[in-house]
Image (spheres, rainbow, N blue to C red):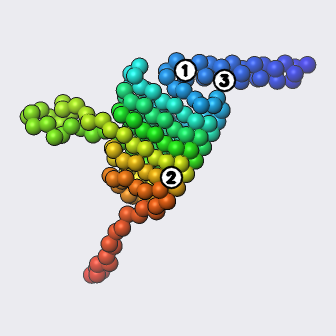
């Protein structure tokens, strides 16, 4: 009898927790294409700054530990089966669209905006405002660790971007993009 009561209470509280989570997500502006499979790891933060901010998330999406998602007056759309590894961030003031089945390695950063440094008005950079743009990432893309994707970039379907690559222009579908380094060995006079 006691075990049965504990099981019923556990089931009740799990259902109540799921209901409260769904109501909270709708209240802050998160929209889901399907109500399943959305996980956020410890110390990860999702912030929608204004009522104009919009975030649409597909099913089976996982944001690992210490991830940051910031939407400020922009629209962020994430497809199904998305994985974002530790210490990655999405910073959206314009529009970011991420397709289905995409993987982000550790430390990946997306910025669809920049300070409007081109104004010659004598103001400090942080007082000049922002230029807003877009980022579009196709389906089945893998961004390796520490990639940075800057504004006004389109990445096609089935693209692999190697670690430590800064993407500042469009990448066609089916491309493997690597950051070429010229490593040199320097003679060292040891003790």
Q: Which residue is mark 1?
A: 26
Quadrant in which the N terminus is drawn: top right
Say which residue appears at 18% left-offset and 30% top-offset: 127
Label at residue 157: 2
Which residue is rendered at x = 62% and y = 39% of the image? 60
Q: Residue at point 32% right, 72% down?
A: 182
The spot of residue 191 in percent (x, y) is 29, 80
Is residue 163 placed above or below 4 in the rendered structure?
Answer: below
Residue 109 to residue 18: above or below? below
**Left or right, residue 7 beside residue 150:** right
Task: Tell which residue pokes out farthest to the right in this image.
Answer: 1
User: Position of 19 compared to 79: left or right?
Assistant: right
Residue 18: mark in rendering: 3
Instruction: Return the disc, 2 or 3, that comes first in the chain's sequence.
Output: 3
Callout 1: SS: helix
Q: Going 56% across and 44% down the picture, which residue do you hit?
A: 100
Name the secondary structure under disc 2.
loop
Residues marked 2 and 3 touching at CB (< 8 Å): no
Asked if residue 92 shows in the view, the reply is: yes
Residue 15 in picture, x, y percent from top left: 71, 21
Q: Is residue 15 left or right of residue 155?
A: right
Q: Is residue 40 above or below residue 100?
A: above
The one of 37 and 119 positioned closer to us in this rendering: 119
Q: Real-space Cα distance between discs 1 and 3?
A: 12 Å
Residue 160, visible in the rendered structure: no
Label number found at residue 87? none
């Amino acid at each position: 009898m006691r075990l049965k009561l504990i099981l019923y209470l556990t089931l009740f509280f799990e259902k109540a927790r799921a209901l409260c989570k769904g109501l909270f997500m709708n209240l802050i502006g998160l929209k889901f294409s399907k109500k399943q499979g959305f996980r956020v790891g410890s110390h990860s933060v999702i912030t929608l700054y204004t009522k104009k901010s919009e975030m649409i998330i597909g099913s089976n999406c996982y944001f690992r530990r210490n991830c940051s998602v910031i939407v400020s007056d922009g629209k962020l759309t994430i497809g199904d089966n998305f994985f974002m590894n530790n210490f990655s961030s999405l910073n959206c003031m314009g529009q970011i669209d991420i397709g289905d089945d995409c993987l982000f390695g550790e430390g990946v950063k997306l910025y669809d905006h920049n300070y409007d440094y081109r104004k010659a008005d004598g103001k400090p950079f942080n007082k000049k405002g922002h230029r807003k743009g877009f980022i579009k990432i196709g389906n089945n893309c893998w961004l390796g660790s520490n990639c940075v994707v800057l504004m006004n970039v389109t990445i096609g379907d089935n693209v692999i971007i190697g670690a430590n690559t800064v993407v500042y222009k469009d990448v066609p579908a089916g491309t493997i993009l690597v950051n070429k380094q010229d490593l040199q060995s320097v003679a060292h006079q040891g003790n």
